[in-house]
Image: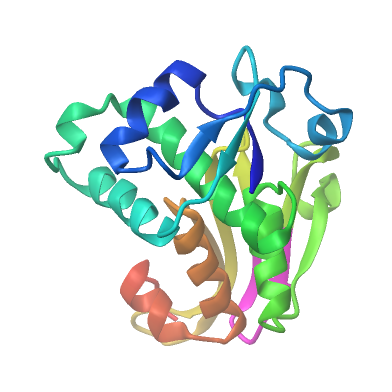
Amino acid sequence: MKVLVTEIEKDNLNRLIPLFGLQSQISFLEETRILDDDKKLNSVYDSIDEPYYIEENIVDLKRVLSLCEEMDWGNTPLRKRIDWDELCCFWGLMLNIMKQREVGYPVTDIEYIYQKGVQLNLPIELKHASVELGFAQDDEECFVVVGESEIGKMQLYQEEDIEFVFVLEYDRKKIFSKEKVMDITHWHPRTVQMAMEDVIAFMKNDREYFRKQVGLRM
């Protein structure tokens, strides 16, 4: 699949490819002119100085993503050979390849989670950030996944297109009186997968999930 790379500099990617055993699965294309349609579709076009194209035929993308996640959690032998910033950029590229394979074109993390949720028949909506949703101002460039379930209301968005924010409005019981009160909390899922799991658990009214994962009293 042809991919526009905007996440990692060409020299850095070229150095990391053999470390992940991808020498025969990623090749650099000679094209220098970036197509206008690709500029519009790729939301992170300006993240590096000179975007470029690659042809990727990664056989086991799931394994590559798993290696990145392992390095995020611990100091693996491979992690000792890779700069942290380079790892994050490479990981971002692998995640965007995964999303592009599944959706067919570049999408943001939030758009990807929304589309996966729709595929699972979750009654969620994708909206622009707005004062109506509790943001300081209307922002047409910031997308928010919103939903309601028996638990309450949720919002999922990203700050500066990087850090996930999961906002939950829910009923909880007071410790002594057991009276139900409305509460609002938030946390920051670390990955696309974790954010997706939070959305699914919420829409399926999985209170036990939030008790275990976030420590909420519901």
Left or right, 195 with respect to 48, comes to left
Up-down relation of residue 100 to residue 212 (above or below) = above
Q: Residue at x 37, y 34 (%)?
A: 17
Left or right, 14 with respect to 125, comes to left
Q: Is residue 198 magenta?
A: no
- Viewer-closest of 4 and 27: 27
- Viewer-closest of 176 and 110: 110
- Viewer-closest of 35 and 188: 35
Up-down relation of residue 183 to residue 31 (above or below) = below
In the displayed orientation, state which residue is furthest to the top: 49
Which span is picked out in magenta? 145-154
Give the image location of residue 181, x and y in percent. Answer: 55, 76
Give the image location of residue 94, x and y in percent. Answer: 49, 45
Q: Residue at x 35, y 79 (%)?
A: 175
- Viewer-closest of 209 and 29: 29
Left or right, 217 with respect to 94, comes to left
Give the image location of residue 45, x and y in percent. Answer: 70, 26
Give the image location of residue 5, x and y in percent. Answer: 61, 31
Residue 59 visible? The answer is: yes
Left or right, 21 with respect to 90, comes to left
Q: Is residue 152 magenta?
A: yes
Q: Residue at x 73, y 75 (%)?
A: 118
